[in-house]
Image (cartoon, grey):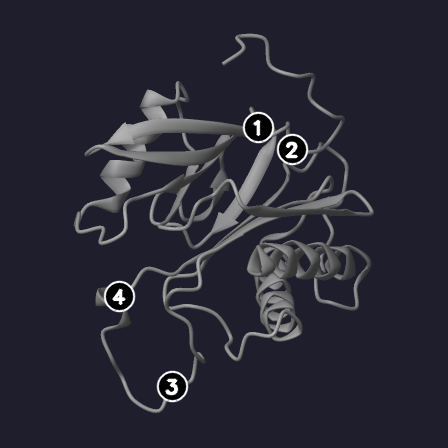
Amino acid sequence: MSTNPPPRPPHGLPPLRTLTRLEDGERLHGLLWRVGDGWRMISSAVLGGGIGERSWILNAQVAHGYRRTDPDRHLAELAREAGVRGPGVGLMTAADVRAYGHVRDGGVEAVATAGLGVKGWAAAAQEGTALEMAPGTINIVVALPVSLTDAALVNAVATATEAKVQALLDAGHDCSGTPTDAVCVAARTPAPGVEPHAFAGPRSVWGARVARAVHGAVRDAARL
């Protein structure tokens, strides 16, 4: 792997890097963004979830039949092996992350990986233990070149989720997702004297761009 990373585009995520490792004899992959300072993220990820300043994002492939009960610790180990330090967001999936959808729309960037081994509707008829079944996870990473309020960050997650469901239906899947889907929305840290955007719903300027970017990325990943 080159030691000289490509130049970072203004305001956006740096180019993602594909990582490869051997684990228990299996070749597994990961997608890594070293975003650096100046980003606030909201995420449902097991590592770095919630809202806060984050400097990297890792979407790591794990083995089918994953049985570790400490995924946060595992992701932290993988991040250290990849050479990143400080607070970040770690997602995982059993899908091959090299088959990802990547769409840009009006300054918004979305990357999605889709493992659909376990899929269904969020409002299922009965409770179950789907996590013990075949692997399936849709991971979505979204980046905006502007700052958002906390409420708008939450709104952006809702918008991305709505767009994900629409994309799955458009790709021919009869489901709203999988039981382990995760999302990460990254926005710029507010600059002094600059008011962050207060809305990210699908009919707001930036929310509409999030929706279109996520829809395209998930649709493409679900078809790969």
Task: Report the residue marked by disc 3.
Answer: 124
Left/right placement of residue 164 relative to residue 114 reads right
Q: Which of the 4 image quadrants contains residue 131?
A: bottom left
Image coordinates of residue 187 in percent, x first then y, are 64, 42
Q: Nearer the viewer, residue 214 or 51?
A: 214
Mark closest to the chain's N terminus, 1 or 3? 1
Image: 107 above or below 169: above
Q: Secondary structure at mark 2?
A: loop
Label for residue 35? 1
Q: Amino acid at mark 4?
A: Leu
Q: Amino acid at mark 2?
A: Leu
Question: What is the C-alpha distance between the residues marked 1 and 4?
Answer: 31 Å
Mark closest to the chain's N terminus, 4 or 2? 2
Task: Report the residue marked by disc 2.
Answer: 13
Is label 1 in contact with label 4 (beta carbons under 8 Å)?
Answer: no
Is label 1 in contact with label 2 (beta carbons under 8 Å)?
Answer: yes
Question: What is the C-alpha distance between the residues marked 4 and 3?
Answer: 14 Å
Q: Secondary structure at mark 3?
A: loop
Q: Which of the 4 image quadrants contains residue 61?
A: top left
Left/right placement of residue 14 relative to residue 105 reads left
